[in-house]
Image (tube, rainbow, N blue to C red):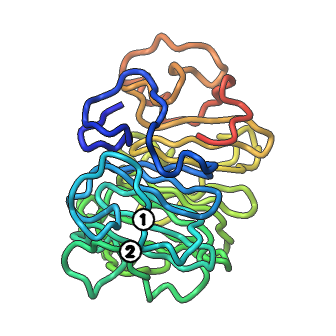
C-alpha cells in the first residue's frame, strides 16, 4: 500500500504493491492482538498490552514526544505503565483505551479531536482525557472526531470535524451539542439503548447496541447511512430488514463505507463503491447483478447487501 510516511513499518518510504513481512522490529517476538491505521500512521497492540507505532508524526500522533516520521514500529514508551486494550487512529491523531477504562489521546487538536480543550497545539505524548469520568469499553476515531462507549452503554463524541457539513445541511437549525464539542459530550438520541461498540468514518459515526441494532449519524454523501437525507444530525436506527432481520454482532467503518457482520455470520457492505471497497458488484434486492444506469448503481450500493465470500469473517 501507500507508504509516503513509512506507515508500513518496513524501514523506508516507498509504496509496496505486494505484502511484505516486517523485519527487524522489536515486537516481532510477541503475538499481535490488533492493528489500526490512520491518515498516514499505523499502530499495533501486542498481547502483552504494549503499543507500537510508525508513520506520519507531524503532529505527534505517534505519542513519542517528537514530530519526526518513524519508519519502523516503535514502542510508545509513554504508555509503559498501562495495558493498552484498543487504539483508534484518526487522520492526524490517536486515541488509546487502556485496560482500566481510561482514554488517552495525542496528535493534532486543531478540531478538538483529542478531547483536551486545555491544549491548543499538538500533543506529543498521550494525555488522559480527564472529562471522561465513566469507564470506557470501546473507542473510535474519524477524520477529525472521536467516539467512546462507556460501561453503562452511553456514547460520547468530541471533535468538530463533522460540524461544517452539519451546518450546511441544518438550514439554520441549532446543532446538537455533541457535533461541536471539543471535549466528550453525550450523543443525544441514544438514551433508550445500551451501546457496546462504536465506529467512525471520515464524517459519520456508528454505534452497535447490545440488542444487535445499528444507529448511524453524520454525513450520508455516499449513502453509508442508508437514508435519503444528506446529513443526519442525530442517530437513526438502520432497519433490521436491511440485514434479513438478523442481529448485528460486529461493525466496521471505512472512511465512506460500512461493513457489518450478523450474529449468524453474514457480512453486509454498503456505501461508497467506486474503488471496489464493498467487495461486490451492485446487485438488485433479488440478488441478481444489475445492468442499471450509473446513477442507479450508486443507489444500489447504498443498500446493505450480503457478500457471501466474507461470511464468517472475524475481523475486517
Looking at the image, residue 85 sits to the left or right of residue 106; the answer is right
Pick the front one: 50 or 262 = 50
Crowdedness of circle 1 by 10 Å Cα count: few (<14), some, many (20+)? Answer: some
Instruction: Determine which residue is flagged by label 1.
Output: 76
Give the image location of residue 11, x and y in percent: 32, 39
Q: Secondary structure at mark 1?
A: loop
**Residue at the spot 27% in from the left edge and 65% down from the top edge:** 60
- Of marks 2 and 1, the one in the foreground: 1
Looking at the image, residue 281 sits to the left or right of residue 315; the answer is left
Crowdedness of circle 2 by 10 Å Cα count: few (<14), some, many (20+)? Answer: many
* Image quadrant in which the C terminus is located: top right
Pick the front one: 66 or 139 = 66
Q: Is residue 277 visible?
A: yes
Give the image location of residue 192, x and y in percent: 66, 75
Residue 24: which disc?
A: none
Q: From the viewer's perspective, is residue 231 above or below residue 181? A: above
Question: Residue 17 sits in which quadrant?
Answer: top left
Q: Contact (CB < 8 A) between labels 2 and 1?
A: yes
Give the image location of residue 6, x and y in percent: 29, 42
**Residue at the spot 44% in from the left edge and 60% down from the top edge:** 75
Instruction: Determine which residue is flagged by label 2.
Output: 126
Name of the residue lying farthest toward the right: 264
Question: Residue 243 sits in which quadrant?
Answer: top right
**Residue at the spot 62% in from the left edge and 71% down from the top edge:** 137
Looking at the image, residue 268 sits to the left or right of residue 311; the answer is left
Q: Is residue 190 visible?
A: no
Pick the front one: 202 or 109 = 109
Q: Secondary structure at mark 2?
A: strand
* Image quadrant in which the N terminus is located: top left
Alpha-carbon span between mark 2 and mark 1:
9 Å
**Residue at the spot 41% in from the left edge and 50% down from the top edge:** 73
Amino acid at each position: 500500500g501507500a507508504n509516503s510516511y513509512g506507515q508500513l513499518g518496513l524501514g523506508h518510504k516507498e509504496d509496496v504493491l505486494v505484502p511484505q513481512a516486517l523485519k527487524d522490529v522489536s515486537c516481532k517476538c510477541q503475538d499481535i492482538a490488533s492493528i489500526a491505521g490512520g491518515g498516514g500512521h499505523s499502530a499495533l497492540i501486542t498481547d502483552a498490552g504494549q503499543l507500537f507505532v510508525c508513520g506520519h508524526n507531524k503532529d505527534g500522533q505517534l505519542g513519542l514526544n517528537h514530530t519526526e516520521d518513524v519508519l519502523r514500529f516503535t514502542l510508545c514508551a509513554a504508555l509503559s505503565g498501562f495495558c493498552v486494550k484498543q487504539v483508534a487512529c484518526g487522520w492526524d491523531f490517536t486515541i488509546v483505551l487502556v485496560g482500566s477504562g481510561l482514554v488517552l489521546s495525542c496528535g493534532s487538536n486543531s478540531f478538538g479531536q483529542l478531547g483536551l480543550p486545555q491544549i491548543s497545539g499538538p500533543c506529543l505524548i498521550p494525555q488522559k482525557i480527564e472529562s471522561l469520568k465513566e469507564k470506557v469499553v470501546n473507542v473510535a476515531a474519524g477524520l477529525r472526531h472521536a467516539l467512546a462507549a462507556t460501561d453503562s452503554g452511553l456514547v460520547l463524541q468530541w471533535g468538530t470535524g463533522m460540524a461544517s457539513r452539519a451546518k450546511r445541511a441544518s438550514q439554520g437549525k441549532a446543532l446538537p451539542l455533541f457535533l461541536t464539542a471539543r471535549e466528550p459530550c453525550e450523543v443525544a438520541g441514544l438514551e433508550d439503548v445500551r451501546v457496546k461498540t462504536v465506529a467512525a468514518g471520515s464524517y459519520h459515526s456508528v454505534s452497535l447496541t447490545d440488542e444487535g441494532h445499528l444507529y448511524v449519524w453524520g454525513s450520508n454523501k455516499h449513502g453509508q447511512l442508508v437514508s435519503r437525507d444528506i446529513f443526519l444530525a442525530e442517530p437513526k436506527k438502520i432497519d433490521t430488514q436491511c440485514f434479513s432481520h438478523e442481529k448485528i454482532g460486529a461493525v466496521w467503518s471505512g472512511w465512506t463505507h460500512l461493513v457489518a457482520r450478523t450474529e449468524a455470520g453474514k457480512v453486509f457492505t454498503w456505501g461508497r463503491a467506486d474503488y471496489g471497497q464493498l467487495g461486490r458488484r451492485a446487485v438488485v434486492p433479488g440478488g441478481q447483478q444489475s445492468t442499471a444506469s450509473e446513477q442507479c448503481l450508486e443507489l444500489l450500493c447504498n443498500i446493505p447487501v450480503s457478500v457471501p465470500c466474507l461470511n464468517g469473517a472475524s475481523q475486517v
